[in-house]
Image (cartoon, rainbow, N blue to C red):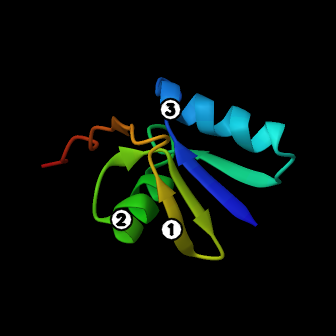
Amino acid sequence: MLELYGAKGCPYTRELRENLLWEGKAFQEYDVEEDPEALKRVLDLTGGRTVPVLVEDGRVVQVGYQGRGCIVSLPPVEE
C-alpha cells in the first residue's frame, strides 16, 4: 500500500495526489501539518521536512513532485 504524506496548502501534494488518482493507485494520505505522528514518520524516514513524500511498504520512493516540494514547519517546542 502506498502512503502519501503531504500538506493541505502544498500544491505539489495536490498534484501528486491527482496523479495517483489518475493512475488508479490506492493510497493512504496523511497531512503532516494536522497529524504530529505523520510528521514524525516523515522526519524519521527522510530526515527532512519536504513534502510530498510517497512511501511504499515502509520505504521512501519519492520526495517532492517533479523536482519540487514544500517545506513544512515544525510544531512549537513546549517549555
Q: At which x and y percent is residue 11?
A: 50, 24
Q: Amino acid at mark 1?
A: Val
Circle 3 Cα neighbour tier, 10 Å, few/some/many (<14 / 14–19 / ≥20): many
Q: Which residue is mark 1?
A: 60
Q: CA distance from mark 1 to mark 2?
A: 8 Å
Q: At which x and y percent is residue 67?
A: 40, 42
- Which residue is drawn at the image coordinates 70% and 61% (left, top)? 2
45 on left or right of 13? left
Q: Which residue is mark 2?
A: 46
Asked which secondary structure carries label 3, the reply is helix
Q: CA distance from mark 2 to mark 3?
A: 17 Å
Q: At which x and y percent is residue 46?
A: 36, 65
- Determine contact: label 1, label 2, CB under 8 Å: yes
Q: Quadrant of the N terminus?
A: bottom right
Q: Amino acid at mark 2?
A: Thr
Q: Which residue is mark 3?
A: 12
Q: Amino acid at mark 3?
A: Tyr
User: Which of the two labelled residues, at mark 2 and mark 3, occupies the earlier sequence position?
Assistant: 3
